[in-house]
Image: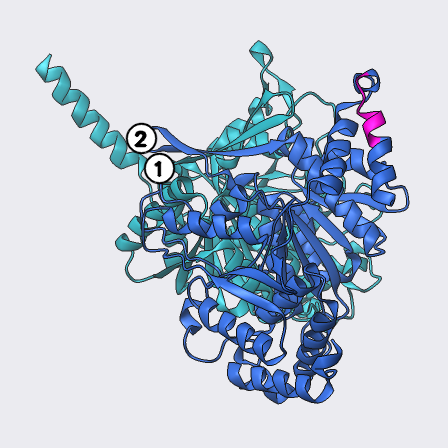
Chain colours: A cyan, B blue
């Protein structure tokens, strides 16, 4: 029995060491990396095609594997994504996703929630950078919001205590807070960001946000090269609309993250130009566009592929292909700055295909 | 007279014969209206002078409230302040209980923000929150208006924010059932939601506003915010002259930074109110410009809208006194001293137009005392002779 115990300990240490794969940018010795592509609904297919075309012109070493994620009911009545999609994602580890629609009264939870649960996507990362050429009242915005994506206020645990009194539970756990804090500091180090700010409301929610803050402080101790400070949620909101340049990386639990990341997206021009990435356990990462499916313009070649394109650039950077990412991003920003060929939501009246072609031309010049 | 007939008709309605036939909503609203008409405590007014509780708080609170007292003394406002100090470093709640008793006695208070040191044990609750819940100050009202003399990115903003002040996420009910797992309870009740929605619509009607927007997150918190939204809709049906719509909180913040002119009156639960009110305060020029008021059935407490302690700028004569002074004008309006209120308010707004008197938070280099001196000078030159008031 004692021998078994030692064997068990040894195996668990080995397994632990193997599991703790730090999320470093990947460098590839061989050539092409396969990425799972989920086109999505509505304008999803057209913008995915646009992105694939631009990547081809940029000669990015990416091979796409298209999959569909319409929810199906598995054994036992539990809703899940199709097994081939799950298998593809588990194999490739990197995914790019377009907008998904959740039909009302379909009986299953939202598609995004399903994906989040399936791959344990615990961090939502949204870099918000002002786009030259797309004028908003705020210039020089350059920040990243990192939001805990699994628990907090969105745990979905609600009860009716008595008729007329509803209780909703906000769950904060040590494990999840530690995981997200570690990720935030790793991200800051890998992307040359100078400071991480934890956003909280620990003056009111003493224990829950207090626990979150403690874990953030512990992670800060381990990463002394990145500056760390804490700020109340209301102070962040107040300062964000007056002077967004003072913020760098923002780290927060679920609800504050939801509100603040959309606030920051609003500062740079809305969801149509904001990239987003979801990092999961086991090295899985799904990059997505966060806007809706826009069924009214679907199929009319009017969609704006910028959000999905910038998410794809984020994906390239995550994979370590900084050169290609930089080229595509520069081409995209150049076209928007020129203002000659812009889609309707950016203020022009060109088609999606024309916009894509303009970017491809720019990329050809840069390659 | 109107109050008497209203009470008579309401007592007929609350008669047992009709009692069972009315819905719960109607009964709650009738009880609220009945109480408001009849059960008002007597005002703390003696010899024509009002007594108001003053809680200096921490950070910039004490110096700003000193300036308020200075301006009041200069303008001969018939208000006496009863000062109650609350020490935020102590663990015992005696200080804040004394303050609450003083407010119960006087009915009206003006306060600075009391700091909550979150290095202390979690059982030491936020003093400000304790004050709000004990006195049942259920409505926090904030009026964000673009001031003409202040440079901001967005112009022509005029938004009233009504925030539920006692429950929601600020219930301070937390427990750690298993080590490493903390649960915090967010409570939404039907009574409080109806009450705040009723307050919002009544205020909108009083001020001639056309549209009320409820801010929520009912797509995720289906039961909690769903109940809040449902209560708002029920109250909205009684006010057909006012348009009612709803918006999810993340969309709201996005719309606020791109197009804030579309909003008129907004009503929301506690936490979203915190976020939205701070965003709006930032849009009109910062925390130094906007006053806030907390109204309950019997009591009213006035303070700055964003409730900042401002420890980093305390004692340096650079804080902006506008918010606290405008809050004191709101207090004078509440005490029905309209003449003094408009006199001081006009002086403040005239001073705001002078760019060289702007304090650091709105991009200028003036000091607090410069601003206060200027206000007093304008009161002296333009105000009516004191004997006429």
* Screen quadrant of the N terminus of chain A: top left
**In what element is the residue under mark 1?**
helix
**Residue A215 picture location, percent across and down:** 33, 45
Q: Are marks 1 and 2 in contact (CB under 8 Å)?
A: yes
Q: Is residue B264 above or below residue B76?
A: above
Q: Is residue A146 above or below residue B52?
A: above
**Left or right: A212 in relation to B134:** left
Q: Is A195 situated above or below A179? A: below
Q: In the image, are marks 1 and 2 on the same chain?
A: no
Front residue of this view, candidates A140 and B238: B238
Disc 2 target residue: B179
Please state, as top left, top right, bottom left or bottom right, where the C terminus of chain A lies in the image: bottom right
Asked whether the viewer can see residue A45, the reply is: no
Residue B363: image quadrant is bottom right
First to last magenta residue range: B10-16
Categorize mark 1 by other alpha carbons within 10 Å: few (<14), some (14-19), many (20+).
Answer: some
Q: Chain of mark 2?
A: B
Q: Residue furthest right?
A: B241
Query: Residue extending furthest top?
Result: A76
> Within the magenta stretch, is there residue A329?
no
In the rendered structure, does residue B13 fall within the stretch colored magenta? Answer: yes
Q: Of helix, strand and loop, which one carries label 2?
A: loop
Residue marked by disc 1: A174
Q: Position of residue B299 (x, y in %)?
A: 61, 49
- Which quadrant of the figure has residue A83? top right
Categorize mark 2 by other alpha carbons within 10 Å: few (<14), some (14-19), many (20+).
few
State left or right for residue B119 relative to residue A45.
Answer: left
Magenta-colored segment: predominant secondary structure? helix
Q: Name the one closer to the observer, B258 or A203.
A: A203
- Residue A294 locus on image (x, y percent): 78, 44
Q: Chain of mark 1?
A: A
Left or right: where does residue A362 sit relative to residue B5? left
């Amino acid at each position: 029995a004692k021998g078994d115990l030692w064997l068990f300990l040894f195996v668990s240490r080995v397994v632990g060491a193997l599991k703790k794969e730090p999320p470093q940018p990947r460098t590839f010795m061989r050539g092409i990396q396969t990425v799972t592509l989920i086109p999505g609904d509505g304008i999803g297919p057209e913008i995915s095609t646009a992105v694939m075309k631009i990547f081809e012109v940029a000669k990015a070493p990416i091979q796409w594997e298209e999959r569909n994620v319409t929810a199906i009911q598995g054994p036992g009545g539990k809703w899940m994504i199709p097994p081939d999609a799950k298998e593809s994602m588990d194999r490739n580890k990197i995914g790019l996703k377009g907008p998904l629609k959740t039909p009302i009264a379909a009986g299953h939870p939202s598609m995004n929630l399903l994906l989040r649960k399936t791959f344990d996507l615990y961090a939502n990362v949204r870099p918000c950078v002002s786009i030259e050429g797309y004028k908003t009242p705020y210039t020089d915005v350059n920040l990243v919001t990192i939001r805990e994506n699994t628990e907090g206020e969105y745990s979905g645990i609600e009860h009716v205590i008595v008729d007329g009194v509803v209780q909703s539970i906000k769950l904060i756990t040590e494990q999840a807070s530690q995981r997200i804090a570690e990720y935030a500091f790793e991200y800051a180090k890998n992307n040359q960001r100078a400071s991480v700010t934890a956003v909280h409301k620990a003056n009111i929610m003493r224990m829950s946000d207090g626990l979150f803050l403690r874990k953030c402080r512990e992670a800060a101790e381990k990463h002394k090269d990145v500056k760390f400070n804490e700020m109340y949620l209301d102070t962040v909101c107040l300062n964000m609309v007056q002077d967004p340049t003072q913020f760098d990386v923002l780290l927060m639990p679920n609800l504050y993250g939801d509100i603040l990341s959309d606030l920051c997206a609003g500062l740079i021009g809305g969801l149509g130009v904001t990239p987003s990435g979801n990092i999961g356990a086991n090295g899985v990462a799904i990059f997505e566009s966060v806007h809706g499916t826009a069924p009214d313009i679907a199929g009319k070649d009017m969609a704006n592929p910028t959000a999905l394109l910038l998410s794809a650039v984020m994906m390239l950077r995550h994979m370590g292909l900084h050169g290609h990412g930089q080229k595509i991003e520069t081409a995209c920003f150049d076209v928007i700055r020129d203002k000659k060929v812009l889609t309707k939501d950016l203020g022009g009246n060109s088609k999606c295909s024309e916009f894509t072609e303009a970017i491809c031309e720019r990329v050809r010049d840069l390659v | 007279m109107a109050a008497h007939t209203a009470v008579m008709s309401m007592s007929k309605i609350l008669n047992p014969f009709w009692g069972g036939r009315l819905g719960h909503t109607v009964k709650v609203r009738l009880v609220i209206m009945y109480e408001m008409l009849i059960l008002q405590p007597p005002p703390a007014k003696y010899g024509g002078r009002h007594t108001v509780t003053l809680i200096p708080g921490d950070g910039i609170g004490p110096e700003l409230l000193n300036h308020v007292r200075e301006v009041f003394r200069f303008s001969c406002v018939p208000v006496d302040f009863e000062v109650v100090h609350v020490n935020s470093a102590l663990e015992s709640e005696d200080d804040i209980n004394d303050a609450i008793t003083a407010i119960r006695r006087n009915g009206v208070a003006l306060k600075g923000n009391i700091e909550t040191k979150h290095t202390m044990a979690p059982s030491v609750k936020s003093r400000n929150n304790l004050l709000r819940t004990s006195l049942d100050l259920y409505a926090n009202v904030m009026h964000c208006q673009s001031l003409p003399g202040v440079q901001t990115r967005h112009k022509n903003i005029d938004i009233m924010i009504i925030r539920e002040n006692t429950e929601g996420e600020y219930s301070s009910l937390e427990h750690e059932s298993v080590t490493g797992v903390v649960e915090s309870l967010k409570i939404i009740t039907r009574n409080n939601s109806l009450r705040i929605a009723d307050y919002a619509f009544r205020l909108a009607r009083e001020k001639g506003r056309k549209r009320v927007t409820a801010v929520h997150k009912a797509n995720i918190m289906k039961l909690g915010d769903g109940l809040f939204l449902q209560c708002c809709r029920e109250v909205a049906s009684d006010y057909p002259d006012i348009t009612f719509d709803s918006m999810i909180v993340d969309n709201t913040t996005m719309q606020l930074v791109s197009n804030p002119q579309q909003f008129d009156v907004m009503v929301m639960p506690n936490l979203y109110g915190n976020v939205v009110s701070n965003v709006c305060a930032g849009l009109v020029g910062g925390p130094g410009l906007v006053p806030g008021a907390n109204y309950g059935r019997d009591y009213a407490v006035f303070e700055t809208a964003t409730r900042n302690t401002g420890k980093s700028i305390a004692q340096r004569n650079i804080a902006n006194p506008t918010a606290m002074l405008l809050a004191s004008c709101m207090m004078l309006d509440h005490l029905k001293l309209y003449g003094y209120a408009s006199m001081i308010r006009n002086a403040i707004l005239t001073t705001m137009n002078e760019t060289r008197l702007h304090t650091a938070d709105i991009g200028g280099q003036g000091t607090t005392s410069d601003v206060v001196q200027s206000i007093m000078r304008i009161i002296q030159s333009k105000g009516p002779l004191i004997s006429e008031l």
